[in-house]
Amino acid sequence: MFISVEGIEGSGKSTLLDGIQHALETDGHRIVRVREPGGTPAGDRVRELFLDAALGKVDPLAEMMLINASRAQLTQDVIRPALAKGFVVLCDRYVHSSLAYQGFGRGIPLETVREVCRIATNGLMPDLTIFVDVSVETSMERVAQRGKPDRLDRESAAFHQRVRDGYRRLALTDDRIVTVDGELDADAVLDAALAAVAVIA
């Protein structure tokens, strides 16, 4: 299985991935867990650059290309080999992040984003994408509590609202996306996510 987890900043993706990983490992699955951008030496360097708050304004197309450079390396070097060996791959962000952030958030036409992502991944998509949906207000409260904000954390509430709305619109048209209410307590979020995983397992 290839499972991605998506959401705006502070939605609880990492906590949810911890729970999913523990549950699947308890059931005997072998797990490879990765994140975007990152997951390879080249990708980790891209991540440092991408999130650097000192970087300032980045052209939306350049931003999308940076992400997909990291994604291409991750897909080729880690995700495809792991799937071929029978591992379950858990990915913190994937193609739907580009659609939500660079498409809906930055305003790049969705078909352009889709095509660049298709080239970067050679068409590989998750079997399941879990979208952890929280309000922008909750997002900003959680981000404020976790310390030094990165470049995306510093974006306006209006930007994050466009991204959230984008995820919600994507979920209406893509049956691989399951939405869970990230405002619930962590156990309830995990239960909803595991119910979705069980359908494809």
Image (spheres, helix red, strand yellow):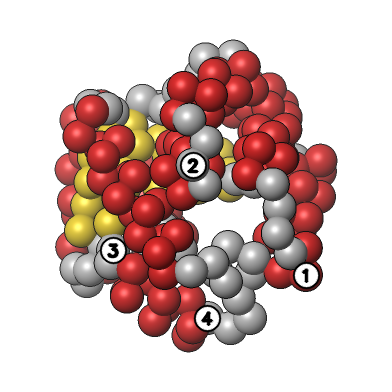
- Please say if 44 is above or below 161: above
Asked if residue 138 lies left or right of residue 147, the reply is left
Badge 1: how crowded within 10 Å, few (<14), some, or many (20+)? few
Q: Amino acid at mark 4?
A: Arg
Read off the residue under disc 1: 54
Read off the residue under disc 3: 134
Q: Secondary structure at mark 1?
A: helix
Do tag 4 and tag 2 residues touch (Cβ < 8 Å)? no
Chain-order first, disc 1 or disc 4: 1
Chain-order first, disc 1 or disc 2: 1
Separation of residues labelled 3 and 4 (CA atoms): 16 Å
- Please say if 20 is above or below 178: below
Chain-order first, disc 1 or disc 3: 1
Do tag 1 and tag 3 residues touch (Cβ < 8 Å)? no
Q: Amino acid at mark 2?
A: Gly
Separation of residues labelled 1 and 4 (CA atoms): 19 Å
**Picture coordinates of residue 128, whole percent (x, y):** 33, 32
**Is residue 21 shown to the viewer in this render?**
no
Read off the residue under disc 2: 107
Query: Which mark is nearer the camera, 2 or 3?
Result: 2
Q: Say which quarter of the image contains residue 42.
A: top right
Read off the residue under disc 4: 146
Separation of residues labelled 1 and 2 (CA atoms): 23 Å
